[in-house]
Image (spheres, helix red, strand yellow):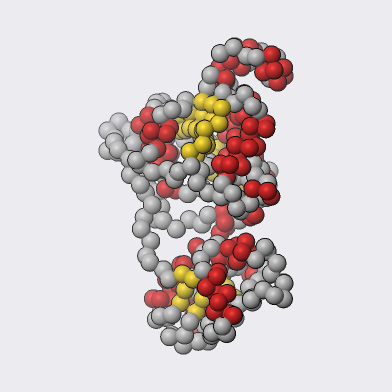
Amino acid sequence: MMLSRDELLRYSRQISLNEIGLHGQEKLKASSVAIIGAGGLGSPLALYLTAAGVGHIGIVDFDVVGVSNLHRQILHTNEFIGISKLDSALATLKSRNPHSKITRHDVRLNRENVLEILSNYDIVADCSDNFATRYLVNDASVLLNILNVYGSVYQFEGQVSVFGDPDGPCYRCIHPNPPSAGLIPTCAESGVLGVLPGLIGTLQANEILKILLGIGTPLIGRMALIDMLTSEWQIIEILKDPDCPLCGESPTITSLTDYEEPCPTIPVITTTELNLLKRDRLPFFLLDVRDKNEAAAVSMGADLQIPLDELSEKLPEISVGYNDRVIVHCQTGLRSRRAVQLLQEAGYTQCMSLDGGILAWMDQYSGKMNDPELPL
């Protein structure tokens, strides 16, 4: 694909590299990459692939921009809060490089659409934040025979690898089966250092560029690990498992499955409904199951604060009857659902989880937790 005069100037510092040159830059223009998720990892990845001149980038996401995203999701800005992440990403990326085609896929990936979407791209970048999507993308990439550049982050630690090469492992070679739904906390629950996704997403972009250009040594059969607190890097070897159920010698997985397990029905209350309870002065007991440092940062004035992992042993501290209304909140609504489940098993019949947690409360009330006009 011929480069325009503007493209020649735009990419001149890259073209001057002997390993890339004009032919390599034309390769990038002819290439396509699917990015799964426009969040912490997808943000730097999309920015750098667009800036590098990848001709076609597809982004899969169905979420909207929230204020708590902005410390790490650098595609998005304040003016897009409450608006589709794809709208935000498209505006940012087109302003970065008008020569790249950006295709939006405003859907939740599932077994019915993932093959059709990914089959239009040369390579896929897994920037997802949940195991259901991670396994789905891994399985689809192997079935389609396209490489999967994987990245993940947790608090201060990150990892990058390349899965799906015929001679290398897939994600199932190291993790054959997904954990139970909700067992592993998300970034919203466990926290993440804002610069970590920037580093890991940029490393994913680097791996993709090497693969598309056919240069260097991609992380096939190897995984890069980084600990941001110690600045220690590790490269570990990961082997292809001959008994892998997906890519092994006798695969048993030949079709796709949606791995999101059904969760027990948990009673929830919305922030609006909680506001009405307070306005009408109806009695309720507010239980905060976040950690102490989270509760110290911002509070809804809970009657009692017990971290979720201590709740089972401290249930006697809840000084209300089994039939009294108990509302449980955490940061996002995940831990509070687990807490409600524990309370139900202990005999509390009128307990509910605050849907969306304290972040939803702050979003609704512009984060002005100390405003005297607010109900809590």
Residue pictured at 43% horizontal, 39% vertical: 137
**Can residue 268 be seen in this snapshot?**
yes
Residue 302 x/y as whole percent: 61, 77
**Can residue 162 be seen in this snapshot?**
no
Residue 54 x/y as whole percent: 58, 24
Picture layout, residue 209 above or below residue 320 = above
Residue 148 x/y as whole percent: 47, 33
Residue pictured at 46% horizontal, 67% vertical: 337
Q: Quadrant of residue 114?
A: top left
Which part of the image, by quadrant, shows the N terminus? top right
Which part of the image, by quadrant, shows the C terminus? bottom right
Picture layout, residue 237 above or below residue 31 = below
Q: Nearer the viewer, residue 266 or 159?
A: 266
Q: Nearer the viewer, residue 124 or 231?
A: 124
Picture layout, residue 228 above or below residue 272 = above
Q: Quadrant of residue 120?
A: top left
Q: Nearer the viewer, residue 16 or 239?
A: 16
Picture layout, residue 30 above or below residue 169 = above
Q: Quadrant of residue 56?
A: top right
Residue pictured at 56% horizontal, 17% vertical: 27
Residue 344 x/y as whole percent: 40, 76
